[in-house]
Image (spheres, rainbow, N blue to C red):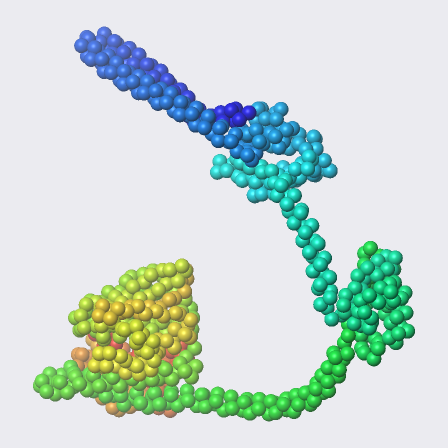
Amino acid sequence: MSGSGLTGILAPAMVNGEDEVTALRARVRQLEKINAALMDRVERSGDMEGGAFSMFETAIALESVVRDRTSALEAAMAELAAANEDATAARVLLRDAIESLDDGFALFDADDRLILCNRAFLKIFPAVEPIAGDSPEFAEMASRVALTGSTMGAALGPDRWLSDRVDWHRRAEGAHVQALGDGRWIQINEIRTSDGGIVGIYTDITSVKAEDARQRALELAERNLALQATLDTLSEGVCLFDAQRRMQAWNEGLVRVLGLSGKDLMRHVESHTQLVQWCSWRLGLECADSLAWREGDTRQLSAECLMDGRHFVIRSVPLGNGGMVFTFDDVTDHVSLQRSLTETAELLERRVEERTAELVEVNRQLVEAKNEAETANRSKTSFLAAASHDLLQPLNAARLFVSAMDGLKLPERPRALVSQASTALDSVEDLLEALFEISRLDAGAIQPEVADHSLGAILHALRVEFAPLATAGNLQFDVVETDAWVRSDARLLRRVLQNFVSNAIRYTEAGRVAVEVTEIQGMVRVTVRDTGPGIAASDREEIFGEFRRVGKTQKIPGKGLGLAIVRRVSTMLDHPIGLDSVPGLGSAFSIMLPRVEPVAALAPTEPASGPSTGSGGLVLVIDNDPAILSGMEALLENWGLEVVTARDPSDACVASALARCPAMAIVDYQLDDGLTGEEAIAALRASAGFDLPAMVITADRSEETKARLGALSLPILNKPVKPAQLRALLRQRDVL
């Protein structure tokens, strides 16, 4: 059997060789046909054209091809012969190796047919030997084993054993044990092969099972001793009676409960009746029913009784063999403790009631304090709104005047003073803006408006905003283009990226600043990388605090509030931020954003048609602050624009300006008499009779105001107005 099985294993190699020979023979036949056809063609061609020499040359070429093919065929036949010799040697080695095994070995193919086994396997399952040479299926082999009762399971239930055995074999999930009919035990370990077959190892473990049985018997004896020792350690008294009501076992606890010595116990309490009499007559048991014998009742009952001046819980447990177990648990101390606990509980209950009343009062005070804090917080928010307007109004006017002076041709000394004043105003603006924003974040006045946004549009705005600043610093500024969309608050996200880019440009003396985008497992990481001085590891946590700046950055303008805002915003939006920096080589600040699918772009709306701006750059400015009007007029006129200023939309000069179709209306948000910028623009458009281009300038940074103006598609410039932003917006609207 083992030889035929090996032939089955090596058969694929032989088949491959035969296939190759067959293919080569077919190729030779094909070449012969091609040769004959070509010779016939040459002969016909010679008859028609008289090219005898050409036919001879063709015949020689065909003969050479045939000879080459024949040589290749002979080489393939030689290689096949060598392969057959190697396969034969391997077959012999494999057969000898398998036969040398002490364990039974069997190999089944993908169709579950036996292709190889050894003598040890046939000794374990002699019923299989007559059919082993015919490559039987495993189910057929198992059926013969079941019919002969070769295993214990097959002898008891052949059909059930056969079904289970075939199922185990097909699962091939590892080892299991079976008992043979002759008293032997075998361990079957069947594993599926890579080609879909099954290899099985069958090990005789009879000696192991015998040793295991001996060990179990020893363990059982030791367990009985341990059980008795365990019973003796119990504080409860335990006794066991058989079905004839004779005492079979007890512990030292029962001896103590009954007040008897070990040798007197069996003399006085040999039976259940004697136990009842001893407990009732000698110990004064009040509830003798707790020791009643119960037949046909499987319930476990317990009763608390007074016996010998002490409290006991007596439990009775009927056994399956007709006997019963009784336990005596002395709970005297427990009863005393319970009484003490009851008294303590009553005392604690009174104290809890007192503490509850105190806590109610404290809670009432906390509610009042919370309400006061919320009121103070609302007052703080209102104060911030009012303070921001009152502080930024004169600052805005100063900014406009300085910007207007910067556009004039001034001597070197006054020009330097104007530049210094502009720098000082920048610092004041940045400080106030950061302080107001931190205050709004801490007060909860800023609520994120999370939606799906195009990251490319946000980065494009960054490129437009900071490219001039980078150019002024002789820095290369690269912003990657991306089509990714993210879920975030666009304004707050832009604020974070603005702080990253602003810091990178401010602190980088030479090299480049780059904005990079990386998609990672459903997230998008935006990184701002620079070639600045870098940040030491010990300072990386400190820089995110308020007014914290480290190292040589102390020499660079700034108040150290930008990263504090970044941390608050990232926490609010749940966008993790990261920092990777090498001192001397630069830093990389990053933020992780949830990636979303792109949203279809809305069709662009056509602007409302209106009269042509034939004035060639007429700008209408409306503000209730004369200083701001003067500063705005000076600034815009320096840019070559014609300016008409007014404190109210109802001023006479406004009507005449509207008749000239101004190119832009610049309106303050907070005007006199409670008039808002959006209301003023609506009145101007109604008077003009066309959709007058307009923008709003405001110190109000509340989310409500931004949302309302955004819904009206009105551009917003926050005070103090940055001339560069104003100029860019005017150019975008073709005013400049």
Quarter assignment of residue 12? top left
Instruction: Determine if residue 530 is in view.
Output: yes
Decide if residue 288 is on the left or right side of residue 371.
right
Check the image and report above or below for 191 versus 327.
above
State the image coordinates of residue 31 (x, y, percent, origin top left). 32, 17
Decide if residue 503 is on the left or right side of residue 447.
left
State the image coordinates of residue 168 (x, y, percent, origin top left). 61, 40
Q: Residue at x 67, y 47 (%)?
A: 214
Q: Between 645 and 653, which is closer to the camera in this rendering? A: 645
Q: Residue at x 42, y 75 (%)?
A: 572
Quarter assignment of residue 276? bottom right
Instruction: Determine if residue 464 is in view.
Output: no
State the image coordinates of residue 475 (x, y, percent, origin top left). 19, 69
Q: Between 534 and 732, which is closer to the camera in this rendering? A: 534
Position of the C terminus, as image quadrant, is: bottom left
Check the image and report above or below for 202 versus 638.
above
Check the image and report above or below for 7 versus 333.
above
Residue sticking out furthest to the front:
263
State the image coordinates of residue 262 (x, y, percent, origin top left). 80, 67
Q: Residue at x 68, y 33 (%)?
A: 150
Position of the N terminus, as image quadrant, is: top right
Quarter assignment of residue 382? bottom left
Task: Count all numbered tags in the image, as a single digit.
Answer: 0
Decide if residue 632 is on the left or right side of residue 287.
left
Q: Residue at x 35, y 64 (%)?
A: 525
Q: Between 654 and 512, which is closer to the camera in this rendering? A: 512
Residue sticking out furthest to the left:
411
